[in-house]
Amino acid sequence: MLSVLLASCGSSDNYGYPSKVTFGKEGGSKICSGTSNCYNVEIDDYNGNGKSTSIDAIEDENDSVVVTYQWLMVTYKPSAGPHLKITAQPNHTGKERKLYVSGMVDDSFAEIKVVQY
């Protein structure tokens, strides 16, 4: 269903970014690359609650944007190209958890569903 939503409101290829990233309970980091830079990055839960940061917040071309929400962190350095570093903390809950990373590209979003087991 997520891919249907993305196709109806933006790029059908999610701007080259993966539509889903999974982590094991140990957590870790993954680099997700796309074809277009984002100018706003946010992390949301299923209900739309979350945090966002715009690249307008950076002062120097070598600065990075960092967004943290609950157990997930996204680091994005616009000058390095269309790459998002997604870091998940270890999952000690014993339950699957999900968050959504969105990057604003042009006038729509590239969205990545992040699942941790």
Image (cartoon, rainbow, N blue to C red):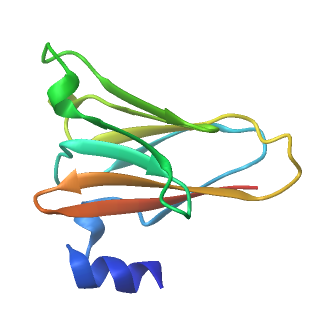
Q: Position of residue 83 (x, y in %)?
A: 30, 41
Which residue is depicted at the point 32% across and 76% down? 6
Res 9 → quadrant: bottom left
Q: Position of residue 85 (x, y in %)?
A: 42, 37
Which residue is depicted at the point 19% across and 32% down? 55
Pick out the residue farthest to the right: 94
Q: How many marks?
A: 0
Res 97 → quadrant: bottom right
Q: Position of residue 48 (x, y in %)?
A: 48, 59
Res 5 → quadrant: bottom left
Compared with 4, 88 (above or below) is above
Is 90 on the left-hand or right-hand side of 69?
A: right
Is 64 on the left-hand or right-hand side of 10?
A: right
Q: Is residue 82 visible?
A: no
Compared with 89, 102 (above or below) is below
- Work out which quarter of the rendered image holds the C terminus and state it: bottom right
Is 75 on the left-hand or right-hand side of 28?
A: left
